[in-house]
Image (tube, coloured by chain):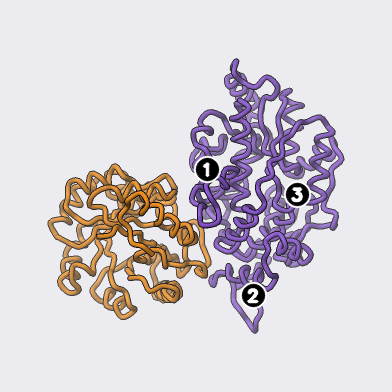
């Protein structure tokens, strides 16, 4: 199995944005997103207040982004019901990202898995260090315990978002990612903090980590993503040839 | 400043963090104590291995601000600074004149002029991908001072001011308003790590003038002059014009604004600020007016009139020079510029781009 690089595209009221600790702080034109050197695209609606208007702007933005791309698409951000998933399904999404940081999402995720199949659902957990992060603050819940509960639910891939590292360019939170990867036999996607290509290489060396997300300015550096792929392959890394 | 300025925060009362910081700063700072604090840092940083000629490096464009830093550090603290310039992409007559003026006043300087083949390529790439033809220059001006200071064993580097706290933006932490860190450089100034710019055309060695070395940064202190001395760009102009022969913009007024004394050293700045207007919906005039209003030097009515007149002015005569530097056809340049217009800011009405929310007098 190849390890994957995913373009995580954050959309705030229909506009592609960069975030720092999950706060949108820099907006971009969506004209330059070129997903062809990635393996998958995840689009997340990060609008602070979600309305019908922001939802339709979100869909418009995805449509624009996918004009240039044939890659598998996952959509997330505020998915709370089977109806939400059906709407995205009509829109051509292959997978759906459901935030499972809070336990009250568990029944819904079980239902969603039953209806759409395990491989269609990505469970997502937000964390700051070794604690989960919800509604803009650290909780007192330990990340690993929450993963344990989700593992028992047997979802599909688990997306770990480090809010602490998000937008910092300091690299992924490998310490916490590795703890989870070593404890649970669960395919992991790691997100938050990538600043240079070596960060991706180092994190993909960890067993059980199937994919990493690049966000922020990495949508605009497709040329170097292709160079990076060649470099990783020359080091014996396991990535798809593009 | 407007809320579309990247990273800015706006209070519930509608003030940006730049204004809030400036009000607090002007009213509450004991500048003598700050000066003593700086003297202690300078004494502490000197050691027997330090350079015997130069006390500090200053990142220097030859403009009113960095030349004020040079003049004041010499006058007030008796320092002998080494001025380091990272060559403007397209140097101007005014910039060259102003740098020579300060040279004649008695300063040494080093000019780093990187390979233009690579610089042109990066400039074109970053204009296209990010709407900013100077991303690599932002890296270069940081790398140049750090590398020179490190190589010549000069323990202190000065920059003028911390833009994120002075004019609005994100303050990473309390320390970051005094000292420039690698996080500040990568995250706020460049937005990327230059090591990522390797591709089929640009090799790792080509990036030498731009790479930011964290190890080197840890060996020197990079300070903001404006943390230790009062900071006012209009006063800086007075200081410089009193001390040296300083050329203002020979056109009489800089494109897109009413001023003639700011960012004079690089023709590319005309495109840089025009792109600010394209990307964020406010231009150089609004920025300049905001700074004047903050210091109670301009009424809102005056600002509104000036902004209505000059903001977003197309730099007509600079564009051919810039297109030539970038080796890009003018029509393609126009196309690239327009691709950076966000749909929440611009509307295309009868083949004409219109701001969705043009400034009104009550917004100022």
Q: Residues within 10 Å of mark 2 (few under 14, many from 20)?
A: some
Q: Earlier in the sequence, mark 1 or mark 3?
A: 1
Chain under disc 1: B
Q: Is residue B304 visible?
A: no
The circle drawn on residue B354 is: 2
The circle drawn on residue B265 is: 3
Q: Residue at x 17, y 46 (%)?
A: A183
In the rendered image of the structure, the colour used to display chain A is: orange
Q: Residue at x 55, y 62 (%)?
A: B129
Q: Earlier in the sequence, mark 3 or mark 2?
A: 3
Q: Residue at x 79, y 41 (%)?
A: B99
Q: Is residue B89 visible?
A: yes
Q: Residues within 10 Å of mark 3 (few under 14, many from 20)?
A: many
Which residue is the extreme one toward the bottom?
B350
Q: Earlier in the sequence, mark 2 or mark 1?
A: 1
| Element on which disc 1 rests | helix
For the residues beneath circles 1 and 3, the answer to whether they share a chain is: yes
- Give the percent coordinates (x, y) of residue A44: 37, 65
């Amino acid at each position: 199995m190849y390890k994957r690089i995913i373009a995580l595209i954050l959309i705030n009221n229909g506009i592609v944005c960069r975030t720092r600790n999950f706060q949108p702080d820099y907006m971009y034109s969506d004209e330059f997103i070129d997903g062809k050197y990635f393996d998958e695209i995840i689009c997340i609606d990060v609008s602070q207040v979600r309305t019908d208007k922001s939802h339709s702007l979100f869909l418009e933005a995805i449509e624009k982004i996918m004009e240039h791309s044939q890659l598998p698409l996952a959509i997330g951000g505020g998915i709370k019901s089977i109806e939400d998933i059906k709407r995205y399904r009509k829109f051509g999404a292959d997978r759906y990202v459901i935030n499972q940081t809070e336990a009250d999402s568990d029944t819904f995720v079980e239902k969603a898995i039953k209806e759409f199949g395990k491989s269609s659902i990505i469970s997502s957990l937000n964390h700051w260090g070794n604690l989960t992060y919800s509604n803009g603050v650290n909780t007192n819940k330990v990340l690993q315990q929450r993963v344990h509960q989700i593992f028992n639910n047997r979802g599909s891939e688990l997306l770990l978002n480090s809010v602490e590292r998000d937008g910092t360019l300091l690299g992924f939170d490998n310490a916490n990612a590795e703890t989870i990867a070593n404890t649970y036999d669960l395919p992991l996607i790691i997100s938050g903090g990538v600043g240079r290509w070596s960060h991706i290489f180092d994190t993909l060396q960890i067993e059980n980590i199937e994919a990493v997300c690049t966000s922020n300015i990495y949508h605009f550096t497709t040329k170097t993503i292709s160079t990076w792929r060649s470099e990783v392959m020359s080091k014996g890394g396991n990535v798809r040839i593009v | 400043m407007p809320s579309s300025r990247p990273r800015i925060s706006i209070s519930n009362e509608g003030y940006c963090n730049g204004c809030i910081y400036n009000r607090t700063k002007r009213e509450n700072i004991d500048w003598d104590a700050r000066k003593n604090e700086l003297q202690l840092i300078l004494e502490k940083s000197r050691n027997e291995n330090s350079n015997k000629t130069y006390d500090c490096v200053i990142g220097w464009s030859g403009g009113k601000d960095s030349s004020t830093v040079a003049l004041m550090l010499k006058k007030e603290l008796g320092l002998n600074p080494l001025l380091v310039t990272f060559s403007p992409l397209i140097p101007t007559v005014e910039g060259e004149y102003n740098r020579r003026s300060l040279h004649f006043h008695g300063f040494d300087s080093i000019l780093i002029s990187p390979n233009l083949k690579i610089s042109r390529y990066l400039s074109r790439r970053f204009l296209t991908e990010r709407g900013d033809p100077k991303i690599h220059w932002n890296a270069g001006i940081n790398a140049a001072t750090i590398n020179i200071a490190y190589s010549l064993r000069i323990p202190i580097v000065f920059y003028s001011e911390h833009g994120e706290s002075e004019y609005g933006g994100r303050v990473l932490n309390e320390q970051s308003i005094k000292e420039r860190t690698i996080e500040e450089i990568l995250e706020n100034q460049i937005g990327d790590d230059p090591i990522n710019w390797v591709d089929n055309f640009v090799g790792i060695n080509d990036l030498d003038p731009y790479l930011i070395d964290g190890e080197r940064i840890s060996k020197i202190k990079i300070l903001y002059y404006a943390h230790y001395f009062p900071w006012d760009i209009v006063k800086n102009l007075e200081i410089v014009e009193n001390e040296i022969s300083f050329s203002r913009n020979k056109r009489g007024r800089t494109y897109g604004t009413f001023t003639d004394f700011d960012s004079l050293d690089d023709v590319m700045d005309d495109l840089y600020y025009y792109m600010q207007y394209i990307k964020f919906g406010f231009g150089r005039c609004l920025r300049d007016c905001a700074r004047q209003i903050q210091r109670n030097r301009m009424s809102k009515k005056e600002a509104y009139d000036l902004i209505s007149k000059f903001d977003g002015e197309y730099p007509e005569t600079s564009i051919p020079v810039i297109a030539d530097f970038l080796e890009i056809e003018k029509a393609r340049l126009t196309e690239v510029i327009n691709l950076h217009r966000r749909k929440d800011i611009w509307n295309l009405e009868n083949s004409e781009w219109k701001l969705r929310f043009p400034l009104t007098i009550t917004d100022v």
